[in-house]
Image (cartoon, rainbow, N blue to C red):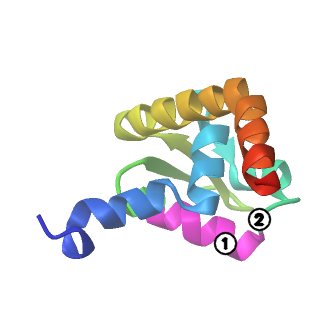
């Protein structure tokens, strides 16, 4: 298998991108989120432009469902698809594991830096 050209690599990059991880974690709660609520939740770390691009990428890959309601002003909600729920489950588990072991990693980094 040629790693640089496989489609799995592109999918991995989308799911594990800086913003993809955050969006999947926020949507992991199972509810639908309005764009404005997602933007507010992530405003300190992601721009509106990057949030839009990330949501479009995740929607294209089949991880996120975008529901547009025909009202004025436009009302758009995002939620995870079954595929997205599976991916988010693994990301949340990894984040939890990292949280549980961060002290060990920090100690290892400090030992390494001192040698």
User: Which residue, given by chain and number where applicable, does mark 1 sit on?
Assistant: 50
What range of the chain is rendered magenta? 47-57
Residue 15 placement, left or right of 53: left
Which labelled disc corresponds to residue 24?
Answer: none
Mark 1 lies on a secondary structure that is helix
| The stretch drawn in magenta includes residue 49 | yes
**What is the magenta segment's predominant secondary structure?**
helix
| The stretch drawn in magenta includes residue 50 | yes
Q: Nearer the viewer, residue 32 or 49?
A: 49
**Can residue 39 be seen?**
no
Percent of width and height locating residue 109: 74, 47
Quarter of the image for residue 54 reads bottom right
Q: Is residue 10 above or below residue 93?
A: below
Image quadrant holding the C terminus, namely: bottom right
Percent of width and height locating residue 33: 67, 42
* Residue in view at x 62 percent, y 61 percent: 18
Image quadrant holding the N terminus, namely: bottom left
Mark 2 lies on a secondary structure that is loop
Which labelled disc corresponds to residue 46?
Answer: 2
- The residue sitting at the right extreme is 44
**Circles 1 and 2 in contact, beta carbons < 8 Å:** yes
Give the CA separation, mark 1 to mark 2.
Answer: 6 Å
- The residue sitting at the top extreme is 100
* Residue in view at x 64 percent, y 27 percent: 96
* Residue in view at x 78 percent, y 31 percent: 103
* Residue in view at x 47 percent, y 49 percent: 64
Q: Nearer the viewer, residue 56 or 46?
A: 46
């Amino acid at each position: 298998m040629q790693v640089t050209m496989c489609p799995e690599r592109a999918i991995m990059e989308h799911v594990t991108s800086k913003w993809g991880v955050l969006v999947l974690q926020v949507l992991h709660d199972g509810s639908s989120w309005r764009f404005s609520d997602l933007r507010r939740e992530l405003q300190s770390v992601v721009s509106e432009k990057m949030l839009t691009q990330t949501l479009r990428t995740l929607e294209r890959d089949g991880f996120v469902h975008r529901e547009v309601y025909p009202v004025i002003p436009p009302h758009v909600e995002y939620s995870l698809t079954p595929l997205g729920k599976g991916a988010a489950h693994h990301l949340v588990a990894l984040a939890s594991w990292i949280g549980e072991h961060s002290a060990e990693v920090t100690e290892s980094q400090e030992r390494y830096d001192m040698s």
